[in-house]
Image (tube, grey):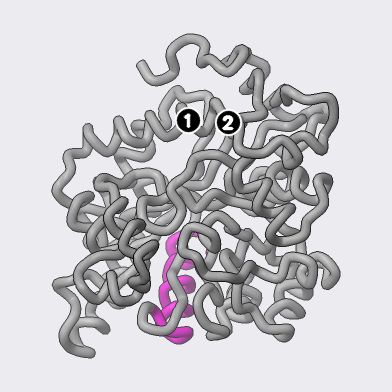
Amino acid sequence: MPGFVDAHTHLPWEGFREDEFNRRLKGETYAAIAAAGGGILATVSATRSASEAMLRGNVRARLDLMLRHGTTFCEAKTGYGLDLPNEIKQLRALLAGAEGHPVGVTPTALPAHEIPPERRGSSALRRRYVEECCAEILPALAEGGARFVDVFCEEGVFSLEESRAILEAGKAAGLVPRIHADELTPLGGASLAARVSAASADHLLHVTDEGIADLAKAGVVATLLPGTSVFLRMNRYAPARKLVDAGVAIALGTDCNPGSSYTESLPAVAFLASVGMGLTAEETLTAMTLNAAASVGEARRRGSLEAGKRADIVLLDGPSLEHLVYHWGVNPVSDVLAGGEHVVSSGDLLGSPAS
């Protein structure tokens, strides 16, 4: 089958948050943990303290794991720097870590992932950070090699008005919009994605019927992240069936990050997409190949096995397509070819990509 495309990841970070995971198992909420200094800002602190070389090594190791599980291309975001020097550090580490690796990477600028700690405490400080994102950080990340701009559009994070300003500023700098939309509340991020001609609206657990109609009309891909739903014990998934029935193309991503979905395995996400969201095996495969490639602007080069495209190929250790989601809890990938080169054989990396 075609090489898998992971349409939503956060790769260049430092600092695990396993303690938060266990605290949630004991009954604490994500919001309460964040209010006590955890959440995204905990990873921001660790990532700011990390050297660029450390982040580069982390990216490389995560790409190795993704490759073993069949991913041959991915999108990856900044967003744990939240100031100009550290966002640039993340982007440089991402690009350097991906250089020469069989897994291709397209970078996304996400300085609007959260309000940084030093910009909290007053509306004036908050406005200054939004202005800084628009006027300083996004142009610098675009010049440094970013391809997309993203924003966490959510109550308590960035409002619809702030999100639109950030996405439009990214567009002015040459970046293509994507958006964290309607994950925790039905704020209207999906409709905003349609208005700014975004490549993708992601998460969508609380997307409204109006938002779904807007996505379909505008041709925006819905990138769904069922791993996050399970990891955060949210007791709900994005309405995949309603999106499909409305004519919205569905893509899948791992959302690989330390706080809300720590996995590099798209096959693990595929199982959740089928069992949790009700996608068929065929729909799931399409969501993690051709539709995911469309989400990241690569559909002309990747996502299907046909003449004129890259020979990114996954060999599944199973007698049929259904085993991708039927034989769960294991890595179903035997071999991987990237650009026609044999890079994984019987589950083992060839040529030591991590070296």
Q: Position of residue 175 (x, y in %)?
A: 49, 59
The secondary structure that most of the magenta stretch takes on is helix
- Residue wearing tag 2: 69
Name the amino acid type tagged 1.
Leu
Q: Position of residue 101 (x, y in %)?
A: 47, 25
Residue 147 visible in the picture: no
Closer-to-camera residue (309/205): 205
Q: Eyeballing the image, is 321 above or below 29?
A: above
Closer-to-camera residue (35/119): 35
Cα distance in 3D space between marks 2 and 1: 7 Å
Q: Position of residue 169 (x, y in %)?
A: 42, 71
Q: Which residues are magenta?
A: 158-177
State the residue at coordinates (22%, 32%).
Answer: 53
Helix, strand or loop under label 2 = loop
Name the amino acid type tagged 2.
His
State the residue at coordinates (47%, 30%).
Answer: 65
Q: Could you tell whether 30 is left or right of 72 in the image?
A: left
State the residue at coordinates (72%, 85%).
Answer: 210
Looking at the image, do the residues carrying marks 2 and 1 touch, with CB atoms under 8 Å apart? yes
Helix, strand or loop under label 1 = helix
Q: Position of residue 115 (x, y in %)?
A: 27, 73
Q: Residue furthest top?
A: 351
Of the 4 image quadrants, the one containing the N terminus is top right
Q: Eyeballing the image, is 147 above or below 26?
A: above
- Residue wearing tag 1: 65
Q: Residues within 10 Å of mark 2 (few under 14, many from 20)?
A: many
State the residue at coordinates (73%, 25%).
Answer: 316
Magenta stretch: residue 160 in it?
yes
Q: Residues within 10 Å of mark 1 (few under 14, many from 20)?
A: some
Q: Could you tell whether 41 is left or right of 8 in the image?
A: left
Q: Residue furthest front?
A: 26
